[in-house]
Every structure is written in structure tokens, then in C-alpha cells.
Amino acid sequence: MLFKQQALLRQKLFVLGSLAIGSLLYLVARVGSLDRLQPLCPIDGRFGPRGQDEIPLRALQFKRGLLHEFRKGNATKEQIRLHNLVQQLPKAIIIGVRKGGTRALLEMLNLHPAVVKASQEIHFFDNDENYAKGIEWYRKKMPFSYPHQITIEKSPAYFITEEVPERIYKMNSSIKLLIIVREPTTRAISDYTQVLEGKERKNKTYYKFEKLAIDPNTCEVNTKYKAVRTSIYTKHLERWLKYFPIEQFHIVDGDRLITEPLPELQLVEKFLNLPPRISQYNLYFNATRGFYCLRFNIVFNKCLAGSKGRIHPEVDTSVITKLRRFFHPFNQKFYQITGRTFNWP
Ligand code: A3P
């Protein structure tokens, strides 16, 4: 009898214990996955309610896979024909500015289901040899896309190259042009840092920024130095305005794209007449990188390469002040032309 009661008690304890462990495990799993589950809503939001512009998620995933396979030479022409994929000339180009955040902008826009990026800088319009190959050569450099998607390419050298506005105009006079700018002195130092790193990689020595940016004879800003010239945004923009009206340009704040990318991307979506699809879910701050990274879906995230977001060398404050004073009137003119004001010193 006593033995029977003990067995019954053990059985009850076992059931209760199992229930408690089960509940505990469920709670742990739930809390652990909250972080991952939460974004499911924004992911739905990203593709939005079914509309004409929409590509179903599966199709998009398939498309990315197929395009990847094709680049590797694995997808057949038949598959491309079957899925109605085409290589389209860009409807929008990120024309610059070098070190403004052009790669981040392109990659972030590529989060939009209606945007397909040309991964490489094509350098069609700024390179005479490439340009001589003709527009079909350029089109063939474009990624495959669905006909209703838009292709975007970026080649920051376009902004400062003399011949480019006319060449782009000849291809498509109504093309949309994106320019991403940063505070001009910071951009010039970033430009210098990239060149410096290239020299160091080849074990070469290089001048200090101060020596390049300031003319030692006049002690004035050296306007022959390319990194300085590129930051005189208004001078370059004026050349473009001989071909395109200002309405065809959209200026992106590159400094804000670093700290607060979503509102900048939403402005671009609007400019490109795209339905808003990029959401906060698609962008997460990575503390190790110190930058926002991209989240395409629950499994696929990526940060930009380490060459984006370099540590800049320290620059003499008097040189910085001199450069900022130099850029100031050009900046004012730039604000006036573009209708977008920045808090640049
Ligand atoms: P720095 O290396 O000076 O920090 P580009 O792509 O035109 O060459 O621009 C490079 C710049 O993009 C970097 O300059 C970096 O500051 C900026 N950038 C903006 N958003 C970024 C991001 N999410 N990840 C990395 N770099 C980003």
C-alpha cells in the first residue's frame, strides 16, 4: 500500500516536474527569440500589402540566387528567358561624390525590392576607352532584373569628370541623378586617407595631408590638390546644370546617412517615385563596426567592407579652420542652388 502511494507520488512529481521544465524551456526559447521574431512585422512591411510594384519574397530570393548563379556562369540563358530577366540601362545613377558614402547609399537602396544595383563601378562615362565601346557594352554590364525594377549604378568619378554630363544626357536626358555629399573638409580628409592607405599597402611613403592641402608658398589652400577640388561641390554641380535641370538631382546628406540612414533613404525612395519599402528593420547599428549594417531578411545581414569607415589621421586644427573658411562661400552657393542646407561650419 505504502509502496503504491509512493509510486503515485513519484508519478505526480514527474508530471509536475516535466511541466515546469517544459514551461521554463518555452520561456527561455521565447525570450531568446524575441529579438529575432520582432522584425517579422517590419519584414512584412518591407514588402507591404500586395501591390503592383511588389515582387513576392520567394521570387526575390530566387532572383538573387539566380543572378548570383548566372554571374558564376551556372544559370542558363533559357532560365533567364523563362524568368523574363533583362539587363536594363540605369534609371538613376549615383554620380558622386567620392568618399561621400556612395557605396553605403547604393547598398542601402538595393534593399528596396524594386531596385537592382550594378555591383561594380562601371566607369563608362568617365573612361574614354570604355565609352568608345558603346552603349550596348554598358547595358551588358548591368545586372539582370525584372522589367519593372530599376537599375542603379554608381561611379563617383562621374561627378568631377568634364565630359560626363553631356554623355549621360545623350543616353537619357531624363535620368535621375543622385549626389551624396559630406562636410567638405571631412570628405577631403577621407579622400586623402584612402590614397594614403593605398600608398602604405605598397610600402610607399606619402605626404602629410597638411602639406598637400596648403600651398607652402602662399600658405593658402591649395586648390590644385584634387581632394580639395572635389569638395568644391558647387563648381562641379554648375557644369552638370548646363545639361540637367536641378529637379533631376537629389542631394543626399552623407553625414546623416552614417548616423541616421533611414530618413535619408526615405527621401531617395520619394525622389525615385518608389513606394516606401526600406524600413528600420533593414538597418541595424553594429557597435563593433561603428556603422549601420544591412539586414535583408532573417538570415542574411551584411556590413560594408572594412575599407569603408577608415580612421582618419589627425590633422592640424589650423589647417582644418583654413579649409573650412575656404569652403564656406562655395557651400553657401551649393545650398542656394540645391535648396538643401547643411550644418557645415
Ligand atoms: P570614411 O572611410 O572616411 O569613414 P564611399 O563609399 O563614397 O567611398 O564613401 C565611404 C564613406 O562611407 C566612409 O568614409 C564612411 O564614413 C561612409 N559610410 C556611410 N555609411 C556607412 C556604413 N553604413 N558603413 C560604412 N561606411 C559608411
Image (cartoon, grey):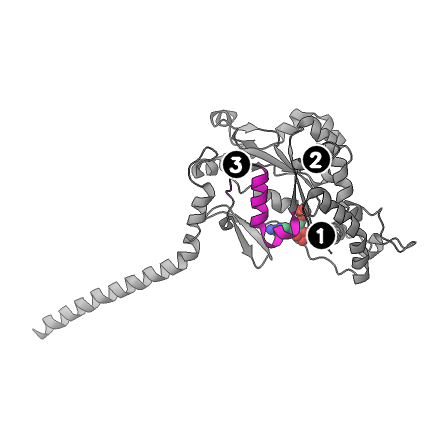
- The nearer-to-camera label among 1 and 2 is 1
> Which of the two labelled residues, at mark 1 and mark 2, occupies the earlier sequence position?
2
- Please tell me in which quadrant of the rendered image residue 210 appears: bottom right
Q: How many marks?
A: 3
| Residue 184 falls left or right of residue 255 | right
Q: Is residue 108 visible?
A: no
Dot 3 beta carbon under 8 Å from ligand 1: no
Magenta stretch holds residue 264: yes
Marks 1 and 2, how far apart in space?
A: 25 Å
> Which of the two labelled residues, at mark 2 and mark 3, occupies the earlier sequence position?
3
- CB under 8 Å between callouts 1 and 2? no
* Residue carrying label 1: 183
Tell me the quarter of the image containing the N terminus: bottom left
What amino acid type is highlighted by mark number 1?
Glu
| Residue 125 falls left or right of residue 67 | right
What amino acid type is highlighted by mark number 3?
Ala
User: Which region shows up in magenta?
Assistant: 253-277
* Residue carrying label 2: 123
| Residue 217 falls left or right of residue 212 | right
Marks 3 and 1, how far apart in space?
A: 30 Å
Whole-percent x and y of residue 64? 51, 37
